Image: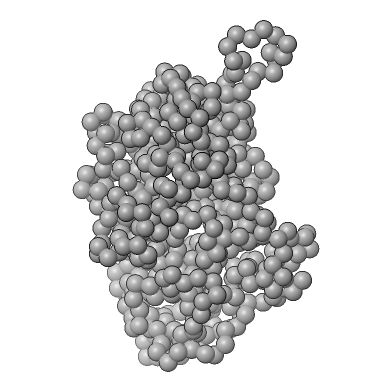
Amino acid sequence: MDRRKFINTTAMASGAILTAPVVLGNVASTSPIEINPDWNGKTTPLNHTWEGLGNIDQMRWILRGDTQNQLDVFRDELGLKHVRAVGIFDDDLFVNDSDPTNFRKKVIGDGKRINWRSPFYIYDTLVEKGLAPIVTPCFIPARLASGPETVFATRNNVTVPRDWKEWERFVADFVNSLVDRYSIDVLKSWYFEVWNEPNLDGFWKGGQEGYWELYKILYSTIKNIDPGLKIGGPSTARAEWISDFLEFGANNNMHPDYIIGHCYNNDSASNPLSPFEGPQGDKENKSPNFTKGVVKGVRKILTDTGFKGEFHMNEWGSTWHPYSPTRESANEAAFIVKTMNEVSQEADYFAYWCLSDIYNQVGYGKEAFHGNYGMMSFDGLRKPNYFAHQLLSRLGREQVAVSGKDIDGLTHALAAKSDKGMQVAVYSFINEWVPGDATPKKNVTVKLPSSINPKSIQLYRIDSVNNNILTNWKAMGSPDYLKPKEKELLMEQNEFSASLHKPKVTKGEKDFEITFEMEMPGVVLVEAKN
């Protein structure tokens, strides 16, 4: 289904525990994969763009203690710095609500008033944790809206304001209140984003012209306060409108400080108008390389127009479908590593959608694992897609070119080095694979320089059993509601751990050959110290 149709449809509907990583059986195919990094060649910078920016479904979830605890883990383990979420103006946060002091009084008008108490609590929480919000001033409070249309079960109003001047005053009050509470210096470390996916009719009824008006109001408001405050857009699905957005900014002397795009790999099914750079076959439905082509397409636009600001791909993933068991598998981990190997240096931030299963845009999950978007479950358990990010963050900051044998666009490797040693992330992504499909195994040989300490070599696997908490949960009987003891036992098995099975190490004249077995789909990180 096209994402436009899906959003519009839902808008209308308004005991047993594994105690160690499992060692894979010796059933490899006869054709080995060979990975030959050019350790002596010229390196290129490997900026960890997958770190730093993360998504929570909606700001109201940050009122919950479990969400706050999960943010601590993402900050401490994955380097989270900026938190993005929509809904800071939701009616659930009472930003334009009745005044209780009017009880039994004669009230002129509807008795509503501006109240920033809930947004302040949310932002206070983030600031106290050393996190900076992405400020997205949406959706429209019902009292200020021109119509009744809402999106999802959360009833977020997506119509244009009933009065643009009234909206301008509301936004100005909001931004000035932020300045008063947090200071200009603090707000300069934040990012302002105008709206979420305004090119989807289900998320915004005002079309492009209405979006331009939103942008002009927010731009003028924050730049009149301080030109150093950062505003960006268009934050569109499939990274559409970017050329139009840059042109609008230039024509109105309202140049954005940064550019925002979104892309899910299965967006290719909806005949998108995305910028695209690459083989035309990669634009076709079910191509594993659609995200790659869109990111490169946006980068080409920015290069051609001379745009010097940041580029944030602040929503991305393999699928926008709310239910996708494959997203909780090792194949998703492989997709993440594959995509970051291909395009991580084309943007300043990549924010995988999303951090947590604490989410209810299309319903609230019952099962402990239910194919939801998050990298972390309701119970705070890390999934394979979480460990893919943790694996990537173990890489050094110097990327090393890779050649090899029996590798292609889906099975390849990302090699890096640092002062401490060498790292090689070998991945195999299987397009259209689903849980229950076969997981064949192959021998892999990775060459490491003779300067490394062979006794230091470690393998970190993400596959159907290793660093895959769903296997442990299923062995427990797949309980929907984890009891405290069950959760405690699963938590004990939920650290990113090295394999107990050591690889075969062969010393050559100039290097070491590291041989091991790899499950497909999956990822294996080879780590060696100097």
Residue 230, given in percent of the width and then of the height, sits at 40, 35
Q: Residue at x 43, y 19 (%)?
A: 163
Q: Residue at x 22, y 44 (%)?
A: 306
Q: Residue at x 58, y 27 (%)?
A: 95
Count the numbered circles shown.
0
- Asked if 507 appears above or below 49 in the picture, the reply is below
- Asked if 102 appears above or below 190 in the picture, the reply is above
The N terminus lies in which quarter of the figure? bottom left
- Asked if 64 appears above or below 73 in the picture, the reply is above
- Is 400 left, or right, of 154 in this rendering? left
Tell me which colouring the rendered structure shows: one colour
Residue 26, given in percent of the width and then of the height, sits at 54, 90
The image quarter in which residue 424 lies: bottom left
The image quarter in which residue 234 lies: top left
Residue nearest the observer in this picture, 220 or 155: 155
Residue 336, given in percent of the width and then of the height, sits at 45, 63
Q: Residue at x 45, y 39 (%)?
A: 203
